[in-house]
């Protein structure tokens, strides 16, 4: 009971503190300053641009006129009328995301208990005392809420926190096996930000295991039986054990696949229909696609940001522009297949890695993307317990986060620096994220190898005993 | 081979690639490396005046001194006449404000210049309780200004614009002459007279390609405020009802034409002319350059080097920079200077022997001491972050400006000096007039050592880098040496976050207390009480983690990492603050360890020399800042609040770094020490 009391105190106290911090920042007038920062508000997510689009719409013009607004017309209808009160919506969406992360964590730890009762030695994380006071989901949620990136994005007027919420909803619904909700959230997330499209495989791999099945059968010819459920060790490891209980869960749920496809089709047609209705007087769906997906893909806005695109595309010859656009965007999509093959059995980890890759390589990144994947990373405190360079990475994130605005200030406001100063920071940020991704994948693979080894030795010893 | 094998047996072999091996080697000998780094850092810091380079003009288009100056004794006489005219006008008039303005308007009209009067109010030094992050200074003027709760008349700048004959009106050079009508000194009158006489000359100059804007800045409320208000209106016009009201509100007798704000293209450079009476009975007139803007920002170095080049070419002036006079009496510094002089002589001889073309120059002890004095003054000005004059207002809009201050005791009878000064200004203006584009790609990050020597960032970053490199090396050494217990990192992170939040609260506190209490001592007392009370729980946050000897290692490495990052970033914002911080924090951070363990290290027979020395020094170094703060509180408590207010008002980097870097770091070190 005492433990339970401390736990809920830590959780609810933390949540209250997070809310207070956000409200204080909102009242201190920080949002006006933060919304101008390129690290927080991108052309796609900026709330200022959204208000501009809303006004254009109100005046009877197309919201996309003048290349100001580049988001979804639905967001325009939801957030636009709120005006100055919209940070409250983002605050709520932050807390909803945190709740979803807690729920995801519950499912994950349930699955983990499922395989840890074989007495597999799991080293405790160096950073966190898990299992004693807080559940991993709760730790991850608190990490998400207290991450300065999340706080600043929430206060600073950017729709990123809303997007994070929809992404987490999709992941949660897919873990629950709720096909309509998963399809809805996935469609919405992809509609808002395009990049969540890459989450198709993690989202479906739990609900149906089909995408992974296809990948395995057609590309790798691993005819292993697929097991469903949240993140767990490779099925091959379990087959060593030949547990009865697992066989039941290895069938592919064709019925759910069809329902997902059906629901996706239904929701996308709904969304597109709605958008078409909103934009019926000005351009319709064609303009919407041009100004949202097209804008993201063709990188028309070269305002400096923390990504790697703007510097390159201000320099590149027009002649080669489309080629390099394909190369840059291809990077993300090249990663999907190998990562999915590697981690098809861990959909949440796979989505964490994919979100990190997207955040590194997307055309208009903001720290909001980092906030999401760093929050999800908290769910793997067990698996990533022997994460190397944790101290170095922590320091590098702090360093880059502080250096970015300083370099921007030196370049734009003081005039003593130049674009190279700022781009160097952006490169450092990309580098830090790459190390994070590579090291996470490495530690996860090491963890699985260790798990396999432990099971093998316990098996052989038990055989000897027999 | 055999020897190699023996060596391998003695020490555990280094594995991995070369880079990794090097890193391991450095980490293994971290104590030695950081000692060497510290010593090298201090030595290279002392060497800075010796390593200074000569100033040069980077921008080719400036062509300083390529034309003959036409400013003559006749113009000087005219300046004297005008000065006398001003003085008689002011002494005889019943409404000096109105009469002076009318006189100035007539003068400017006669020169064919556009003129107008710009009214402004000093910014109110208040922060709204909420929204203190979004407040900015406004200089908007109504009929009256509220200054410290009293109604006062607004300041009025007189601005004259000479349209260039050859120009297209897109660019302008600004000349600023501060004046104070209430107590106009003879020097001030001459400065006005000289400026008007210069304008007269410029109105006839055929070479002028950029408009010349002359701002007679009303320094009723500080010189800076007047220029800042005018520049803000110039660049960010405020369109509101009250500004239209201001248009209708005319000076009695003046038409509304005189109030209408006029502009003259983008400003290329600004020069502030000031005349002051020299202290003492010295008859020598000298010219002093001031360049430090807000937060230690310097103008493009060409601004100083052009002046320096013209002065040294004509050999008519004694050009000086502000220094710390007391330093020149320090004997030890002089002896250090002698050492450097002897070493420099030898080096010069060697260089001459090997490279026959090399110039054999060395720094004499006298130069060295002067250099140190100027360098320290410049660093001090940069550190405070308060501009040294009205030129600082230009830097806030990315414009380059310097103040040229004439210090003289006897200007009335020193015709030659004034004529030469007029020629100098004419020459500088002519140089800037030659510019084809914005000043760029020259030095902005430098510290002056003497009027013709400077230390650029590439040089002064070396000692700083050497000092700073201690942080990552020691942090890495700590991280690798001890296997941390599971809970210690959580606790360390928690403590660091708590202390950082506390410091942030401390930094914001003055803005809120400003509203709640009216008297400075109450504010200070409440502030100290509040912060003390909030900090107490952190120090009580002790747990069973103390069981092991090395519990403090994660905390210390986090402190080292954060402080290193913060100082590194700070060096890009304001180098002087970062350097002062490094000098203060490096010894403190490196020696921080719990009192109990330093006690043990002192008496343990096996402990090495370094750990013993560290054990002795740690208490002194860790408690040093605490003692300093306590003494300042005890002795200067009255001035402290106004100093804090000043720092907040200027948005000084010193304020930010004192609260977000120095304070948490020293608190964390104290936490380690006392627990």
Image: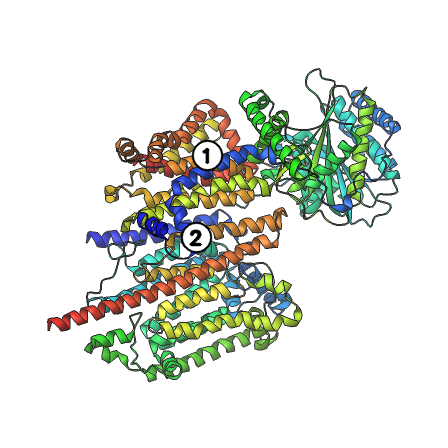
Q: Is B2 in front, or is A357? A: B2
Cα gap from disc 2 to disc 1, whole angstroms: 29 Å
Display coloring = rainbow
Give the image quarter of residue B617: top left
Give whichever of B205, B87 is nearer the camera: B205
Element at label 1: helix
> In the drawing, does residue B654 fall left or right of residue B199?
left
The chain holding disc 1 is B
Residue placed most toward the observer, A235 or B369: B369
Give residue A211's position: percent from left, percent from top: 38, 79
Of circles 2 and 1, the one toward us is 1
The answer to whether residue A333 is above or below residue B499 is: below
Query: Quick one: quadrant of the C terminus of chain B?
Result: top left
- Looking at the rendered structure, the secondary structure element under dot 2 is helix
Residue A268 location (% of width, % of height): 47, 78
Furthest residue in direction front, as rendered: B2
Does residue A358 sit above or below B532 in this rendering?
below
Q: Which residue is mark 2?
A: A148
User: Do callouts 2 and 1 point to residues on the same chain?
Assistant: no
Q: Are marks 2 and 1 in contact (CB under 8 Å)?
A: no
Q: Position of residue B494 (x, y in %)?
A: 34, 47
Residue at point 42%, 74% (across, down):
A338
In the image, is B98 to the left or to the right of A42?
A: right
The residue nearer to you, when weighing B593 against B577, is B593
Q: Position of residue B587 (x, y in %)?
A: 42, 35
Q: Is any atom of residue B125 visible in this view?
A: no
Q: Is residue B440 left or right of residue A251?
A: right
Pointer 1 residue: B584
Crowding at dot 1, Cα within 10 Å, few <14 / some 14-19 / many 20+, comes out as some
> Is residue B557 something one can see in this rendering?
yes
């Amino acid at each position: 009971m005492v433990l339970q009391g401390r736990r809920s105190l830590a959780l609810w106290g933390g949540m209250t503190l997070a809310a207070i911090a956000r409200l204080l920042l909102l009242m201190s007038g920080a949002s006006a300053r933060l919304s101008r920062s390129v690290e927080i508000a991108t052309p796609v997510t900026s709330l200022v641009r959204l208000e501009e689009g809303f006004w254009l719409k109100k005046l009877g013009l197309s919201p996309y006129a003048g290349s100001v607004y580049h988001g979804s017309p639905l967001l325009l209808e939801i957030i636009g009328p709120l005006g100055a009160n919209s940070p409250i919506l983002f605050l709520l969406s932050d807390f909803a995301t945190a709740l979803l992360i807690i729920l995801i964590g519950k499912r994950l730890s349930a699955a983990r208990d499922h395989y840890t009762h074989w007495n597999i030695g799991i080293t405790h994380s160096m950073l966190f005392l898990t299992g004693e006071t807080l559940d991993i989901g709760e730790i991850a949620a608190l990490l998400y809420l207290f991450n300065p990136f999340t706080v600043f994005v929430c206060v600073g007027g950017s729709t990123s926190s809303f997007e994070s919420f929809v992404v987490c909803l999709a992941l949660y619904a897919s873990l629950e096996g709720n096909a309509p909700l998963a399809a809805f959230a996935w469609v919405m997330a992809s509609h808002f930000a395009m990049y969540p499209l890459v989450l198709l495989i993690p989202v479906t791999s739990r609900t149906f295991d089909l995408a992974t099945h296809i990948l395995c059968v057609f590309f790798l010819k691993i005819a292993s039986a697929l097991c469903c459920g949240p993140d767990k060790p490779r099925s091959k490891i379990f087959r060593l054990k030949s547990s009865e209980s697992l066989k039941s869960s290895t069938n592919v749920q064709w019925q759910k696949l069809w329902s997902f496809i059906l629901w996706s089709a239904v929701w996308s047609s709904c969304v597109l229909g709605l958008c078409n209705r909103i934009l019926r007087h000005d351009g319709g769906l064609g303009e919407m696609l041009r100004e949202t997906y097209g804008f993201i893909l063709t990188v028309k806005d070269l305002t400096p940001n923390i990504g790697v695109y703007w510097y390159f595309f201000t320099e590149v010859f027009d002649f080669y522009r489309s080629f390099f656009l394909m190369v840059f965007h291809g990077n993300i999509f090249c990663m999907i297949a190998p990562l999915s093959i590697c981690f098809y059995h861990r959909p949440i980890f796979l989505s964490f890695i994919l979100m990190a890759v997207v955040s590194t390589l997307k055309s208009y990144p903001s720290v909001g993307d980092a906030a999401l994947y760093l929050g999800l990373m908290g769910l793997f405190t067990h698996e990533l317990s022997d994460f190397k360079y944790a101290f170095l990475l922590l320091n590098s994130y702090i360093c880059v986060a502080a250096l970015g605005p300083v370099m921007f200030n030196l370049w734009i406001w003081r005039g003593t620096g130049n674009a190279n100063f700022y781009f160097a920071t952006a490169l450092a940020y990309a580098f830090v994220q790459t190390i994070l991704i590579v090291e996470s994948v490495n530690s996860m693979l090491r963890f699985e190898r260790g798990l396999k080894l432990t099971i093998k030795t316990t098996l052989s010893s038990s055989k000897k005993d027999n | 081979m055999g020897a190699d094998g023996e060596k391998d047996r003695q020490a555990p072999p280094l594995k991995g690639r070369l880079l990794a091996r090097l890193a391991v080697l450095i980490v293994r000998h971290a104590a030695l490396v950081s000692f060497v780094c510290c010593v090298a850092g201090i030595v290279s810091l002392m060497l800075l005046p010796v390593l200074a380079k000569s100033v040069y003009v980077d921008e080719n288009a400036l062509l300083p001194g390529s034309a003959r100056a036409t400013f003559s004794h006749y113009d000087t006489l005219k300046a004297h006449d005008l000065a006398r005219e001003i003085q008689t006008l002011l002494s005889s008039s019943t409404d000096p404000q109105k009469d002076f303005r009318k006189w100035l308007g007539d003068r400017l009209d006669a020169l064919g210049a556009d003129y107008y009067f710009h009214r402004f109010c000093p910014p109110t030094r208040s922060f709204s309780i909420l929204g203190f992050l979004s407040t900015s200074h406004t200089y908007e003027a109504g009929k009256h200004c509220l200054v410290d709760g009293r109604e006062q008349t607004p300041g009025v700048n007189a601005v004259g614009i000479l349209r260039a004959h050859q120009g297209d009106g897109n660019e302008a050079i600004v000349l600023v002459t501060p004046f104070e009508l209430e107590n106009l000194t003879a020097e001030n009158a001459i400065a006005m007279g000289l400026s008007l006489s210069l304008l007269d000359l410029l109105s006839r100059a055929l070479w002028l390609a950029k408009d010349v804007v002359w701002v007679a800045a009303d320094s009723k409320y500080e010189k800076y405020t007047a220029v800042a208000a005018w520049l803000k209106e110039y660049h960010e016009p405020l369109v509101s009802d009250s500004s239209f009201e201001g248009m209708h509100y005319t000076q009695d007798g003046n038409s509304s034409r005189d109030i209408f704000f006029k502009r003259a293209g983008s400003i290329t450079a600004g020069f502030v002319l000031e005349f002051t009476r020299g202290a003492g009975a010295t008859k020598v007139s000298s010219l002093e350059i001031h360049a430090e803007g807000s937060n230690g920002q310097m103008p493009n170095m060409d601004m100083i080097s052009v002046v320096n080049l013209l002065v040294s070419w004509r050999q008519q002036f004694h050009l000086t920079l502000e220094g710390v006079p007391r330093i020149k009496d320090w004997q030890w510094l002089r002896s250090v200077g002698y050492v450097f002089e002897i070493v420099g002589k030898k080096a010069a001889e060697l260089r001459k022997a090997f490279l026959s073309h090399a110039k054999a120059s060395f720094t004499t002890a006298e130069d060295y001491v002067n250099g140190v004095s100027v360098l320290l003054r410049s660093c001090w000005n940069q550190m405070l972050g308060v501009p040294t004059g009205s030129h600082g207002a230009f830097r806030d809009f990315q414009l380059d400006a310097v103040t040229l201050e004439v210090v003289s005791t006897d200007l009335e009878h020193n015709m030659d000096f004034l004529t030469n000064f007029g020629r100098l200004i004419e020459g500088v203006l002519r140089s800037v007039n030659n510019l084809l584009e914005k000043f760029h790609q020259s030095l902005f990050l430098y510290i002056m050592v003497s009027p013709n020597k400077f230390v650029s960032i590439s040089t002064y970053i070396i000692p700083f880098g050497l000092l700073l490199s201690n942080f990552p090396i020691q942090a890495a050494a700590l991280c690798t040496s001890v296997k941390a217990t599971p809970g210690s990192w959580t606790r360390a992170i928690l403590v660091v976050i708590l202390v950082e939040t506390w410091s942030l609260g401390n930094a914001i506190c003055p803005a809120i207390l400003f509203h709640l209490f009216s008297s400075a001592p109450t504010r200070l007392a409440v502030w100290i009480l509040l912060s003390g009370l909030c900090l107490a729980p952190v120090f009580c946050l002790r747990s069973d983690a103390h069981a092991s000897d090395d519990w403090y290692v994660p905390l210390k490495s986090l402190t080292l990492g954060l402080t290193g990052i913060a100082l590194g970033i700070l060096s890009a914002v304001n180098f002087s603050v970062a350097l002062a911080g490094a000098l203060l924090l490096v010894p403190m951070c490196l020696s921080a360890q719990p009192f109990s363990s330093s006690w043990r290290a002192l008496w343990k027979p096996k402990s090495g020399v370094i750990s013993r020395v560290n054990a002795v020094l740690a208490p002194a170094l860790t408690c040093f800042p605490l003692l300093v703060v306590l003494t300042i509180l005890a002795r200067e408590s009255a001035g402290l609040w106004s100093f804090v207010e000043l720092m907040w008002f200027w948005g000084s980097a010193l304020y930010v770094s004192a609260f977000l870097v120095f304070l948490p770091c020293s608190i964390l070190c104290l936490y380690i020490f006392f627990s």
